[in-house]
Amino acid sequence: MPTGIGSSVFAQETHVVMAKGVRFDPLFIYIEPGDIVSFENMPTHNIETLEGLCPEGQEKIKSEIGQNFTQTFDTVGIVTYKCTPHWGNRMGGFIVVGQPENPGEILDAYLATTDEEKEYLPARGLIKKLRADMEKQGLV
Ligand SMILES: [Cu+2]
């Protein structure tokens, strides 16, 4: 719960991400720290965070395939996740938690990481889409 000095107090909100085919909809969500994300319509899908594309302090998450999944996110930053069985189809998404400092630098670092780690390669196009969305919103 964000109750410290200098942080606003928000009611805990629940955000829904739906699996549709081999995509997550919406592809990126913007939430406040402490909010809940509910992943639904997951008959053949799961959620697995990509450790190299997550903020420091974000716990590793790997949900069960075929199960809806609900998770609270507390760590400010950009969380990247994939669907393990459909990562070859680039089924993944982002949760932007709070207002990370220098989001442009974070995204640059994430892109560089995708060059180094083959496992992260499918994230490249997704990161570019996130950057475009954040630019549109004036966040980058
Ligand atoms: Cu999937």
Image (cartoon, helix red, strand yellow):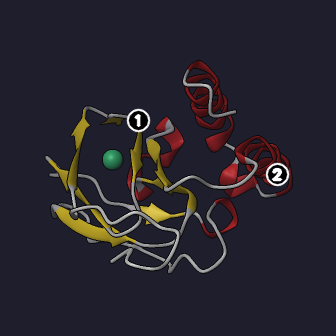
Say whether residue 122 is visible.
Answer: no
Residue 73 percent coordinates (x, y): 39, 69
Q: Tell me whether circle 1 and circle 2 mark residues in contact (CB < 8 Å).
A: no
Residue at the (85%, 48%) spot, across then down: 112
Residue 27, label in figure: 1
Residue at the (81%, 47%) spot, across then down: 105
**Closest to the observer: 79 or 88?**
79
Q: Is residue 70 above or below residue 93?
A: below
How far apart, in angstroms, are the residues tagged by discs 1 and 2? 20 Å
- Residue labelled with disc 2: 109
Say whether residue 24 is visible.
Answer: yes
Q: Is residue 38 left or right of residue 1?
A: left
Q: Which quadrant would residue 10 be assigned to in this image?
A: bottom left
Q: Is residue 45 above or below residue 57?
A: above
Q: Is residue 9 left or right of residue 123?
A: left
Element under label 1?
A: loop
**Closest to the observer: 138 or 54?**
138
**Closest to the observer: 10 or 39?**
10
Identified by mark 1, the residue type is Leu
Element under label 2?
A: helix
Residue at the (59%, 27%) spot, across then down: 129
Residue 94, label in figure: none
